Image: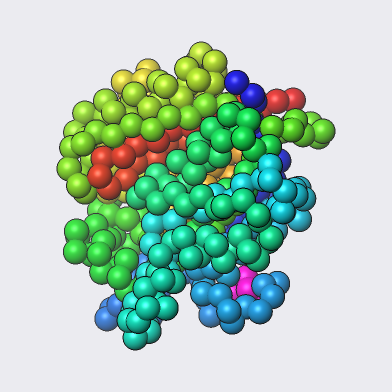
Amino acid sequence: MKPVFIIADNIVSPIALTANENFDLLKAGVSGIQLHHTTIAPEPFYAALFNEDAGFTASVNNADAYTKFERLLITSVQDALSLAPVDCAGKRTVLIISSTKGNISLIEKEPFNADVKRRVGLPASARAVADYFHFTTNPVVVSHACISGLVALITGMRLLQSGRFDHAVVAGADIITQFILSGFRSFHAISNAPCKPFDAQRNGITLGEAAATVVLSVEKPQTKNYIRLSGGAVSNDANHISGPSRTGEELHYAIEAAVKEAGMAKSAIDFISAHGTATIYNDEMEAKAIQLSGLQQVPVNSLKGYYGHTLGAAGLIETVASAHSLKANMILPTPGFETPGTTVPLHINKVLQTGIYGACLKTASGFGGCNAAIVLQKAI
């Protein structure tokens, strides 16, 4: 199959508005998580949220015509395309949008009418973003719980490998609303402090809002130190609508399939960017899956302590950060982790680590028992 390369990327987050700026601040240990007092909750809560003057809409033309969610996507895509211009109007380029909730905030703020009903639908936002950049192909929407970002990347990879397209602009975003926060609170899944992935004292997630974009291409980059998306797979454990597998076998299946497609030995994986939500059951399941895959000695990190759980953007944000980690020969630490807290021991990375790294495994899991894994490889 055709090799697929990452030719540009972006992260728009409460930390910074470009991928390079985000990565520099991650290396410095900067987190976007703060204690917030907002109208979406009756009491303060920890999250990574944009300030009102975040400035991410400054470059969006006719910004008032778009929702906050759509402006986030446009800003992210715009920056990525500035790094690797592709022919958006051409028939060989596709736009893929990843999100879990999209414009759900409209039902909290607007009278529910036909226009709000239309705009809440993800296809409406995808069309708005596609038209902004003059895409002529129909945009693809991926909304698959918290693995949406990875599934969107795998979808883009498959479309390019099939020969249907030469370029895929894969963008994901979610914003935190009263609907989302109250939903997770109903599961008693929100931590009362910044999240602590894989830690013995972890007690839930910290939410975050952000956007990220990855531009995929079948055209090999001319620069050195580029990243190839070389494998990906999805599985489902069908255990429970909100509770993951108790064995980790199904995520293990996705890991095995992704590594096999990448055509590499598992011993070549230098680090794992885990989903690492800091809930009791997710972290335990991931630990078991990693052990079943024979990777328990490989350094693992979770970036949720920097960004919070950004839902449909999480897989993309963490993929971009992992790609930059490979290029910089660095493994980022896991903010919040202090004491091992899973029954299966893992090599959780606690400090910024340097070395020579060539491959990364990225995993994700979500409601409904869904799991995904991709493999990133660096070419010198």
**183 is higher (above) or lower (below) than 57:** above
Quadrant in which the C terminus appears: top right
Where does the image place residue 241, in percent across and percent down from the top left? 20, 47
Residue 368 shows up from this direction: yes
252 with respect to 77 (left or right)? left
Is residue 55 on the magenta stretch? yes
**250 is higher (above) or lower (below) than 205:** above
Where does the image place residue 81, in percent across and percent down from the top left? 72, 53
- Magenta residues? 54-58
Quadrant in which the N terminus appears: top right
326 with respect to 210 (left or right)? right
Q: Residue at coordinates 70% horizontally, 25% vertically from top-left?
A: 379
Q: Residue at coordinates 54% horizontally, 32% vertically from top-left?
A: 158
Predominant SS of the magenta segment: loop
Which residue ends up furthest to the right in the rendered image? 222
**290 is higher (above) or lower (below) than 148:** above
Is residue 242 on the magenta stretch? no
Q: Nearer the viewer, residue 232 or 51?
A: 232
Residue 275 shows up from this direction: no
Q: Residue at coordinates 54% horizontally, 21% vertically from top-left?
A: 262
Q: Report which quarter residue 71 is drawn in.
A: bottom right
Q: How is the image coloured?
A: rainbow
Q: Nearer the viewer, residue 223 or 81?
A: 81
359 with respect to 257 (left or right)? right
Where does the image place residue 293, in percent across and percent down from the top left? 36, 20
